[in-house]
Amino acid sequence: MPRKTPLYDAHEAAGARIVDFAGWAMPVHFGSQLAEHEAVRAACGLFDVSHMAITDLAGGGARALLREILANDVAKLDEQTDKALYSCMLNDNGGIIDDLIVYHRGGADYRIVSNAATRERVRPYLDERAARHGVTPAPRDDLAMIAIQGPRAVEMLRTALGDDAEPAVALKPFHSVETADAFIGRTGYTGEDGFEVILSAPAAGVFWRRLMQAGARPCGLGARDSLRLEAGLNLNGQDMDEETTPLEAGLGWTVAWEPEDRFFVGRPALEAQRRDGPQYRMIGLVLEGRALPRHGCAVRTDAGDGIITSGGHSPVLGRPIALARIPAAAQDGFQVHIRNREVPARAVRPPFVRHGKVCV
Amino acid sequence: MSEVPLDLKYTRSHEWVRLEDDGTVTVGISDHAQAALGDLVFVEPPEAGAELSADEACTVVESVKAASDVYAPVAGEVIEVNTLLDDTPELINSDPYGEGWIMRLRPADAAELDRLMSADDYRQLVAEE
């Protein structure tokens, strides 16, 4: 039996089509994925992301633990307790185990939000590493998480929370605040303004209902995927995995090389790859025609074949788009192999869409 | 429960077939099929004039989720395809039995139509899925 989030009954009542995602019964859409996608670009959409893995790390060793297991450096949060940091967690070969957001909650306390699909892989790994630092990770499966995304997210939050929304509305992007009953980050996975709100299961039901009453549209995993693709954001397990390093996945900017004497898991392998030059790099593609590139399609280039890591229809461009991993030396001649045909494509630098506007 | 018009014939692979007065048949995909596929964004029909054999994969319908084949319900010649679907594939979602039709065939052997499922049988198939 797949697990259910605290909002499952509300989704069923709203007519959601439910699918099994990473062991969770989640809404894939509530009638139309395209309409949900457009609602987020033009107004405001709501996502139940309670399947994400929330883990609290408290105690003196948490900072040292995170500096060891993350490729980005939580020391950047030392002076900014309200700031969030995006990072990959690597294996010894520099391959990506997971990508996550870490929040510094003040003092020695941190919270990480990582992927649902990698929960069973990450939790034992974290426990083992944490034990060496005298830290006991606390999985917060008791909490729910709701993403409110779109140009009207602020308005919806104000309607739902009244004056209690103000601390969140004042947040800059990638910052967070804790109120009496919620943990709110100005973060998201859509390329739009918005918030991710972590709160107790009972409070989540009330909050979700208020946001819907305010006019925010419930959205499923389908729209979540097409929105993040347009925003050029990687999906772990799709655009990257334990065989892929951040340098090959377009995430070199998330690796903190300084200070040079900070050891983190995967660093020696990553430094060697940086020195020799990675063999692959990540690009965006806009395709001719309407046939859709899918994960695993071959990409012909002037330097050998690459691969589509994510692809689909872009509602905003009205065209097929994709993220692709190609030979680092490839410059030209991009064609995607779809159903025995070679479809010409133009290489672009993601994001494809940001704040409702086309940027390629 | 999805809509299953009584005056149409159906296939196990979720096509519907309407016998027209002139002996040709119009083919589309059922309401159940369009709902399962999700929003359609691309339809690649056969060329008019193509000769299809029964159960031949002849059309690709692509939704936001995945690409699927549509199969020829009977053998025959393609005499017309719905060109509206080039720019508005979502007609299959909004009106699967009307404006969302995919192609018209001239059956090679009218007797083949007897192999198709009745609305009652198809309704049962959908209920079991």
Image: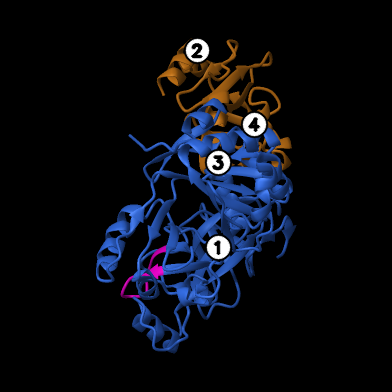
Chain colours: A blue, B orange
Q: Residue A125, position in %: x, y? A: 28, 63
Residue placed most toward the observer, B7 or A222:
A222
Q: Residue at x 41, y 52 (%)?
A: A53
Q: Nearer the viewer, mark 1 or mark 2?
A: 1
Quick one: A186 or A107, which is closer to the camera?
A: A107
Q: Which residue is mark 4?
A: B92
Q: CA distance from mark 4 to mark 2?
A: 21 Å
Chain ID for label 3?
A
Which chain letter goes with mark 2? B
Which residue bears the numbered disc 2?
Answer: B118
Identified at 67% across, 26% down, the residue is: B95
Disc on the earlier residue, 3 or 1: 3
- What is the x, y in percent for residue B27? 60, 26
Say if A87 sits above or below A197 in the image: below
Q: Which residues are magenta?
A: A89-98
List x then y, in percent, for residue A346: 65, 67
